[in-house]
Amino acid sequence: MKIRINDADADILLETEKNVGEILCALESWLTGSGHRLSGLCIDGETINSSAMETCFSREIDKINTLDIFTSSLPELIAESLFCVLREINAYETATYEEKNQFAENWKDSPEACLLAEQCPDIFSWTTQTFAGEGSGTQALRSITEERIRELQDPAGETGRIQLLVSDICTRLEEFSLDIQTGKDSRAAETVNFFSGVAEKIFRIYNILIMEGYPVKEIMVDTTPIDEYISEFSTALGELLAAYEQSDSVLVGDIAEYEMAPRLRKLHSVILNGIS
């Protein structure tokens, strides 16, 4: 039996494998290590759809001439799943009342939902709530889904596009202590939420850049390896949120102005320069 992966002949020596499922199990660790996942299967020119996959696994290899295995990178698969969310939003908006009652449960059983539950649990949760008639509505879900797709399809470009956003939130962090002192509690709360969202976005883009093969893990922040710098950043972020929840305005102001603002500027700057 000839085995091909993404249309290229695969140098795979079969040992004890007797069926397609055993071959795929043997390949699973290699796929995971390469940052890819199985995205399609074709046996003797016949494409195997998802409903026939379980039956396909039991097919004996001595009765197969050619096994074509197709893989995609994890970012590609996540982006594809997010595009499915956009299509499902359109379907939900035009669905009848009766159809909407089952929409969330039906969506949760889809392969796209399973992948998002594993890789993007916040999007999975938000989508499920929206399709259950809860949350902020379909327009908010569409907006955040489109943003995540931009991050996946063009992480380098998205890093550059948020430069003004980073500058704005850093300025607000430097003004955080004054906002608290002058009774601007709503602005202070908004700043905390705004900052958390921007920091999470930078972390997401950093991880996507790694999956896409950018050498960002080699970046040094002054004399500190970037992974260590991010770990320190995350620790400081946790301290900020804890102090804010405890209403320790003095500590919150100090951490925001002297720790988080310069750290966020530096982190974004070194990633942007590292991929330029």
Image (tube, grey):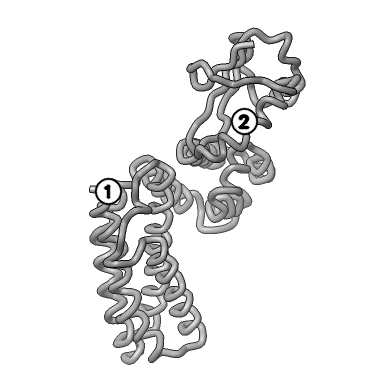
Q: Position of residue 148 (x, y in %)?
A: 42, 48
Q: Which residue is label 2 attached to? A: 27
Crowd band around label 2 with a 10 angstrom C-alpha radius: few (<14), some (14–19), many (20+) = some
Q: Secondary structure at mark 2?
A: helix
Q: Is residue 252 above or below residue 37?
A: below
Question: Which quadrant would residue 175 be assigned to in this image?
Answer: bottom left
Residue 212 seen by the camera: yes
Q: How many marks?
A: 2
Residue 90 seen by the camera: no
Q: Which residue is label 1 attached to? A: 275
Q: Residue at x 30, y 69 (%)?
A: 169
Crowd band around label 1 with a 10 angstrom C-alpha radius: few (<14), some (14–19), many (20+) = some
Q: Position of residue 138 (x, y in %)?
A: 50, 49
Amino acid, disc 1: Ile
Question: Which quadrant would residue 259 be assigned to in this image?
Answer: bottom left
Q: Is residue 187 above or below residue 266?
A: below
